Amino acid sequence: MNRFSYARAKSVADAVRLHHVTPDAQFLAGGTNLVDLMRENVMRPKAIIDISRLPLREIEATESGGLRIGALATNSALAWDARVTERYPLLAQALLAGASAQIRNAATVGGNLLQRTRCLYFYDPATCCNKRAPGSGCAALDGVNRMHAILGASEHCIATHPSDMCVALEALDATLTVAGRRGMRTLPFDGLHRLPGRTPHRETTLAGEELITAVELPREGYARNFAYVKLRDRQSYAFALVSVAVGLRVENGAIAALGCALGGVAHKPWRDREAESLLIGRAVDDTRAVERYADAVLAPADPREGNAFKVELARRAIVRAFELARAPHCADAANVTAHDSGEPA
Ligand code: SF4
């Protein structure tokens, strides 16, 4: 049995301090990923710092017209918050596409940001995995890699990031508030997750003791033209083979601004801002322009034998997401009901 110490943080500063003075500690919030990993002997922290009772659950408007989401807000609370469903329906749609109702009730926003890959080999301590045991190799390279990355991978790791919420946050240009030993700092969402490179065990840019306290959404929520398309092996409780989050601001029939991110294809939510510039000023129904954008995004794809199908799947998913986003108030979002999602009405 893995023995560990347990401490409950009294404040954010106390959590940061406890982590700093405790070697090999992990923060515990909803526990929906960490506890599983500990049960499976994939993670063996020496200490658990319980942050679940810190006052970080508030969802509140910001002075700049955006929304500030406490890191301990649950995925359910966020998905069904009226300000989110009305102003950031892309985020609500992505949240409801993830996990199950029971898990969303327990899982926190901060935990969702930091959840670990679902690579089968990562979860199997009998196999080699550079992410779980640095330097041991990567069983997925020549193994079953159907779910793995086609963009941004390395010869050390081809795992994907599993979150749906993060794909929407990337498209929405979210920012994070992070507490550390020197106080608070702001981090663009795009700067949180790392590509695997030679150190796939280092998944974020956070220092060990740093704690994400909030996610902030800007004023622009793409509430009128948006879509979250998630392609998976079964309709619920499955991770994405490919997902696409897209939000458009349409003015006079043309794309005036957009955010588009892909999930299930890389070690982090994948966004190509340079390719997005190809679409600015284009007619919103210019499918050829969207196809050129998709080709540009996927040009660097370097799939393995088992996941080569993802390149064409991603291309089609991008085109489909833009088709859905064209229509004001995307039909799919309108069809997400409490009944469909298992949430109380
Ligand atoms: Fe481990 Fe990454 Fe290889 Fe999966 S893809 S076995 S997580 S190193």
Image (cartoon, rainbow, N blue to C red):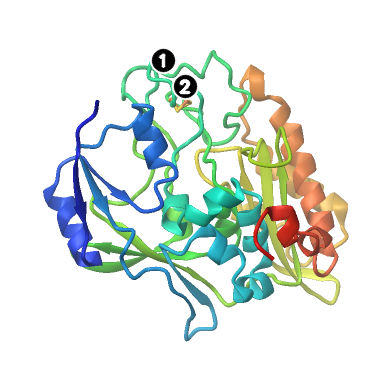
Residue at the image position 29 percent from the left and 58 percent from the top: 51
Q: Quadrant of the C terminus?
A: bottom right
Residue 200 shows in the view:
no
Residue at the image position 60 percent from the left and 63 percent from the top: 79
Q: Residue furthest left?
A: 21
Amino acid type, mark 2: Tyr
Residue at the image position 43 percent from the left and 26 percent from the top: 122
| Residue 129 shown left or right of residue 142 in the figure | left
Res. 300 image quadrant: top right
Q: Looking at the picture, how far across and down is residue 169, in whole percent?
A: 55, 59
Front residue of 165 and 260: 165
- Name the residue tied to disc 2: 121
Of the numbered discs 1 and 2, the one sitting upstream in the chain is 2
Q: Secondary structure at mark 1?
A: loop
- Name the residue tied to disc 1: 127
Q: Quadrant of the N terminus?
A: top left
Q: Are marks 1 and 2 in contact (CB under 8 Å)?
A: yes
Q: Quadrant of ligand 1?
A: top left
| Residue 143 shown left or right of residue 28 in the figure | right
Residue at the image position 43 percent from the left and 47 percent from the top: 193
Question: Mark 1 CB in 8 Å range of ligand 1?
Answer: yes
Question: Mark 2 CB in 8 Å range of ligand 1?
Answer: yes
Q: Residue furthest front?
A: 344
Residue 77 shows in the view:
yes
Front residue of 232 and 244: 232
Task: Using a 10 Å C-alpha cutoff, classify the residue at mark 2 as few (fewer than 14 neighbours), some (14 to 19) or many (20 or more).
Answer: many
